[in-house]
Amino acid sequence: MVNGYLEDLIVGRVLRSSTTGFDCGTHSTRLDDRHSFGAFVEAPIANRDDVYAIGLIYAVRVDDDPLVSELVRAETVEDNVLRDQRENRLIPVEISVINIGWRNTERTFPGLPPRPPMSLADVTACDRLVVSHFTSKHDFFRLVLNAAEVPSDDLLAAALHYASARAYEPDERETFMIDSGRKLVRLLSHDLKRLAHLLELIRP
Amino acid sequence: MTLPHNPNDLDAWELPRPGARTRLPRTPSDNGHVALTRLGVVVGGSLSKGLVVKLDREVAIEEMAVGRYVVVHGDNKRFFCMVNDVVLNATNPAIQGDPPDIREDNFLRAVYSGVVAYGTINVAPMLVIDEEDGKPRPVKSIPSHFTEVYNADEGDVNAVFGAEDQAHFNVGRPLELEQTQINLDLRRLTERSVGVFGKSGTGKSFLTRVLLAGVIARGQAVSLIFDMHNDYGWEITSENGSKVKGLKQLFPAKISICTLDAESSRRRTAKYDFEVQLGYDEIEPEDIAMLRGTMSLSDAMIDAAYTLSKRWGTNWVWRLLQGRSEDIDEIVEHTNIMGGTLAGLQRRLERFQRWEFLVQHSSGDTINQIINKLDQGISVVLEFGRYGSSLEAYILVANYLSRRIHESYVERVEKALGDQGMEPPQLLITIEEAHKFLDPLIARQTIFGTIAREMRKYKVTLLIVDQRPSGIDEEVMSQIGTRVTALLDNERDINAVLNGISGAGNLREVLARLDTKQQAIIMGHAVPMPVVIKTRAYDEAFYAAMLDRPVSTDEARRTLGNSGKERRIR
């Protein structure tokens, strides 16, 4: 299953999931831009390999273990010990994703996916074309803005900057951000202070 | 579009680009010129109060102007509407208390404008055009929510106002539609009275000259023009100092100038045909009654005039002005006229002696001369010369001539018994300062009030030019078929002009915001719907257009001047 292309895209594997989101795990050494806050990821839903849940990474946690706890209390830690701890020991990294849409082979859809991904399913970074198509409509904004368990304003701003940088040509980015800003103005016209803050966050 | 199951297979993807909106529909107009631009969608309103249109954010609010035409494209009908208000709105009123700082911030400007803060226009449906037969009809319904609104193009305007022909005359163009024109139905214009209103300096005289030129050029009526300030007959100096042609210069064979002040006409090299002199013996008490307001005549003085006329006959004015003591004593002794009243009337009428056109006995038959001209299809301009500055003289002469010409028309129309060949030509009497003639206190007694009320019954109608329409009797105003109104800023004048006009409330803002020059709103009988126009310039192009029509042999003969010999023009 894993080939060179997916190696580049893979974010982790599903640990636990629901229709509203899922957590996936990976090794600390693999953490890079794919795992950034606000990145678009996707995972096949249970028992279908042609339907993918699309989500946003809203939290990345590096867990501890007894040795880490002991090391942080030590007065000095040698560099080779630190490198050994980081590179050779299996420090679990947990990534939390909120579902904002799904796709099949024809279209992308805003909203929650029909079923959650199965455990250990591959979680991959969305291709730029998926991101581009999915973000060309702004229907997922409401889902993010109304999500109680996530830092919604910062998450949406990060997602838009991620999409702008990854999925749009330089000359398209300003227009994308202005279109996104207008959608936010429509959604948040009742709450001008929140709107002003969010527009500051997404300013290109 | 196909999304790949395998993300490697990306070739088939066809993605929309950001900012690539669906193109606005742009429909070719009748002449093939693409001109339609979407302005927004209907979001509310009513038939009585007009429609509310939310403007698209691309539309510059600054470019929206009251009086402009828009067309609402319904499913089966096009609603022809006029913009009568432009409004700034916000989805959240709180934004007015804490507006975003968008100075030099194009991003914030772009996202806020047209979304949380947006523009709306109020539009008044004026006509509906059924897509099936293309005929304009009165509006009895309104389009549904979210119907698209476009600016009106040439095709829309032409569908409503028709093309220029023998009965339709181009008087200008609608605002912002350079390539089209508004054509007045001259037949309908002249069959009822017409009012040209506007505050001082708004170009009423130029507008009137354009209307008269149309009527005369198309032969729809003849006109008797009481030319108070020598504005119509011969060469006129416009406000910018340039010379413009009078009607006589445009239509030498169709205009005759007569004058009350031959010296003034000669000084201006105005080619007049005859001089008008009125005899004191022709002045009747009714003519004096018209001067009640301008000469401060009391009721007792008016009664005295009737008594004197009865006692002394036709020469009563002359005898009163001579003021021989035996005459005065006789009147005071044998009638109930008080000496003071008689002296007051005499003092006031002494002004007549300064008017050289008044003579003891008139030598010519002025009335018949004018009627003969009118019967030949020749319009008559009566120049007042220096007497134009005397309102009393103007009122006396206009009333004197109009009353007698009207009597002649009544007699001839009744004699004709419906035989159109026997009837005199349709006559349009043009008077200025009309509120002095049609004041509510005297309108019922004056000939002009009678003419206005009779409408087309005796083939005489009025073209009244005035800057104070509120001073005109309400009943007379209600009988004015077509109102051509330049800028008015007095609330009472605006009310007077709009009184009786369907959907007048919607036009109030339009009327109060016309440009001071070359803009007017035309409402009433001669147009299918109220229309704001940039009036046609009275210039070389206009002169050329007036001449650019087939000239009859008879006309050509008269124009060339045959010195009594017949030229062979076939």
Image (tube, coloured by chain):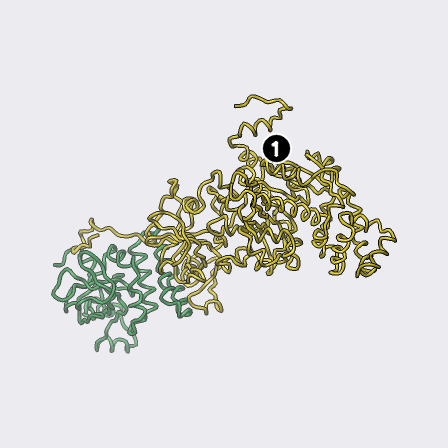
Vertical arrangement, residue B131 with respect to residue B556, above or below? below
Give the left or right position of residue B436, taking residue B48 as reference. Answer: right
Q: Is residue A204 visible?
A: no
Q: What's the colour of chain A in the image?
A: green
Chain bearing mark 1 = B
Question: Residue B350: x, y in percent?
Answer: 80, 50
Q: In x, y percent, where is residue B380?
A: 63, 39
Residue drawn at x 49%, y 40% as measured from the top left: B167
Colour assigned to chain B in the rendering is yellow
Point 56% across, 52% down: residue:
B454
How many marks on residues?
A: 1
Instruction: Name the residue nearer the viewer: A64 or B215.
Output: B215
Quadrant hosting residue B148: bottom left
What crowding class fits label 1: few (fewer than 14 Cα within 10 Å), some (14-19), or many (20 or more)?
Answer: some
**In-front residue for pair B157/B211:** B211
State whether residue B271 is above or below residue A133: above
> Label 1 is placed on what type of residue?
Pro
Q: Would residue B388 appear left or right of A119 to someone viewing this image? A: right
Picture layout, residue B557 above or below residue A100: above
| Helix, strand or loop for disc 1 | loop
Q: To which quarter of the image does residue B355 belong? A: top right
Which of the pair B70/B36 is nearer the observer? B70
Q: Which residue is mark 1?
A: B252
Residue found 65% across the figure and 37% down from its top: B243
- On screen, residue B210 versus residue B260, left or right, reads left
